[in-house]
Image: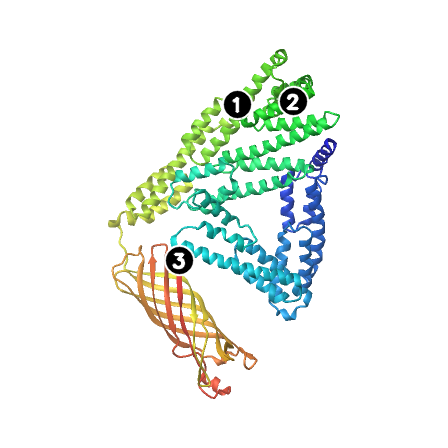
Amino acid sequence: MPIRLLIVFIVVLASLNEGFGQRFPNRNLYDIWIVAGEHLDKGRFDDAIKLYEVAPAVPEFAKRLSSAKRIQTIFQAGERYYRAKRYPEALEAFSRYRSIDPTLQVDVLDARIMTCLQELDKKLAAKLDATTRVVAGFEWAYKGEQQLAVLDTLAAKRSFTKAKQLGGGLNTTLREQYQQGLRSVKTLGAWGNAYHRAVNKDGTHSLETMKAYRSASKYIISDIEYEIKSVEEGAKATLSASSNIDIADRLRGYAEQCRIEDLYYFIKNNRNLIPDSDSLSVHIEEYRRVEWDVERLKNDPANRPFLESAFASLLKVAEEIPQIGKQVLFCARKNYSEDLIEAARVSETQGDEGTDNEKYQEAIGYIVKARTLHLSQFEAQLDEIQTRLSVKLECKLKQQEFAEVAPRIRTELSNCRIVEAWQLWEPAKAKLAGCGASDPEFFGQYQNLQDMVYRFHRADSLFRVLNPLAEKALAARQCGQARQLFQKIGSLDLCDFTPRDQAMAGSSQRIAECERVNCYLVSRDKAFQSAENRDWKNAYDAYQVAYDCAEESQKVRIKKIMADMKCDAYPDSCRKGNVSTALHPTGRVAFNNPVYFDNGLLNETNFGYFVSTGLQVSFLSYLNPVDVVIGAEYFRTKYSVLSTTQGQSRSAGDFEVEGADAFVALKLHKPNTDPNKLRPYLKGGIEMLLPFGYSLTNHDMYEATSDRRFLKKQSLGATAGFGIEMEKKKFGFFVEAVFGYNFSGIYNSNFVTSSGSRGKTEANFRTAGLRAGIRFW
């Protein structure tokens, strides 16, 4: 086993140095695994395969390498059909990848499968051959199961129904799958209704009602399990009335107890109460993913190099978690320590059963790693194991190893390579921990070396912490804190003063610049706040202070703002006009339910859509109660005439009209209003439709026409509505509910009669919807 592990390490290191040294500097196996998975998801199979080939002796890499090669072959076969738009053959080819590894989902293949399903969905199921229908049915059933797993019963029902429509009775397994899925949808739906009735009745989450979902679903739904666990513990799932202190205590409590799942769902259920909850949730989710991978890799001892790299990633992810990173990092270290202790015990047992000391050396390696995690709660166990191993290997051997490393440590110190010296010192010193004070003379000769290592390591570590903090404080414009941090940096007794001197160079000027920028930003923000409160004089004065602290390029802009604001700050020097104009880009979305006569008979129509966009000019008066509005828009409307066959309503004809819409209207509002505040109004006027496009598809006669001559050149109508508006100096908008009736009709009666109509044929548009406009000038 040691030889095998050694070979794995050599292969991995060689591959990293030779094949991937440029692409993955300082990356471990787990980083490569993640990047390879991203390549696989994006369809970059060659890149993914190269990365999986890095560690062929690691079982997980070997298994995924084989799967990636087979998936690439499947993708290439399916892609040829896909690009040729032969979607049935493409779907059948792509779907084969699910049989390779049921636990593996590849985004590019899932996306291709969904596109094929959507394309096939445009065709009638009867037109598809049996094989295609069965394959598509299985894919819809698979999607339905995924949707059920997250309690999306509506989407799951649609998916299982599509599977039923496609598969029918063509395949027994498929039939059982969609029937079971539809039953699950029904039982989960009934459970959901009972759950919501209980909540609506007394406002609480009934524990028994929540637990009932387990009998309605074969899936374990994490969100509901968290709710159940919270109620069982007497802790509510949400904290709508809790204080920030209570929330922080709950976060720390979950983290300190290493209840990562509960922590994740607590954050998820209280997003609006937890500061920076989105970032915190993303970091916790990443930690959970790596932790799951760690637990999976523990199952096979041959994955040890991969497991070590996964633990390294787990520690790194934990360090980056905001607010509770210290507590979660403790959990990661605890997990890693427990694994290393168990690995050491296994290796020790294997050493006892063998005849050489390699397994003992391997066990000590695990103990040394565990000691570098610095968890005092495991020190007794580590001492016990290492003491036993020390007796077996003898302290003299370890002293000899330490004596061989000591000159290298001194060399690193002499070159001020403190990190490298510490990396040599810590494991070398840890190996001697089990020997105690059995040889004071040996330990005494290295006391001076120990003092130097600790002194320079402490100073170097402080510099590595303080320098980024000082830079961060400057970036955050915390000038006083930055000054204190730079003073501490200047007092550090580093081995090599060069980094310290470089960090201190220009720090005084940078702090002075920080204070100048703060002066400018604080004064500018005060001006913004005063302007928002319409306190123009204080805003003007604040801009004057900001001007004194500003750079030359900023002064030009501030001077212009002050010139624009002067009339508001000193109203006696300016006079406001009575009437102004405003130009708005506009858009309208409405329903259209025309009154339609065909050959003298009134026909039922559906509610079609009516959309338009264009420009509107308003002549605004804030002293008088009447404004004038004119505008022009491009419009497009589509509706259908309905008929009834055997008691069922259907479309007898689809109509589509497009053209220009011009209107003139009057707006009524209260006089003497403030342009900086919202103002309600009533509106009425006339509009003229100028159609230039027409399309009719007659489903009864199986004919279609787009002859523009059926329509009048112009058609008059009335428009009315009500809305609100605000028209500031450089910003304005309006939103209104608008109604219209086209009283003159749209059809050219002369052409309609000459085309064979035996009675009145006319359509009068009736529209109701919303129009809005906005300007930034």
Q: Residue flagged by tag 3: what amino acid is it?
A: Arg
Q: How is the image coloured?
A: rainbow
Q: Amino acid at mark 1?
A: Ala
State the SS at label 3. strand
Name the side, left or right, on which 115 lies relative to 614. Answer: right
Q: Earlier in the sequence, mark 2 or mark 3?
A: 2
Count of marks placed on residues? 3
Q: Earlier in the sequence, mark 2 or mark 1?
A: 2
Q: Could you tell me residue 97's position as x and y percent?
A: 68, 54
Q: Mark 2 and mark 3 in contact? Answer it, CB < 8 Å.
A: no
How packed mark 2 is, by other alpha carbons closer than 10 Å (few <14, some 14-19, many 20 or more), is some
Q: Which mark is residue 388?
A: 2
The picture places residue 68, in percent across and down from the top left corner, at 69, 49
Residue 653: x and y in percent read 51, 77
Quick check: 118 above or below 646? above
Quadrant (top left/top right/bottom left/bottom right) for the N terminus:
top right
Q: Quadrant of residue 616?
A: bottom left
**Viewer-proximal residue, 723 or 570?**
723
Element carrying mark 2? helix
Question: Which sits in the foreground, 38 or 92?
Answer: 92
Question: Residue 396 location in percent, x, y?
Answer: 68, 16
Q: Which residue is mark 1?
A: 459
Return the residue at label 3.
775
Residue 771 visible: yes
Q: Secondary structure at mark 1?
A: helix
Say whether residue 173 is left or right of residue 763.
Answer: right
Residue 348 position (above or below residue 71): above
Cα distance in 3D space between marks 2 and 3: 81 Å
Instruction: Give, as a three-letter code, the residue at label 2.
Output: Arg
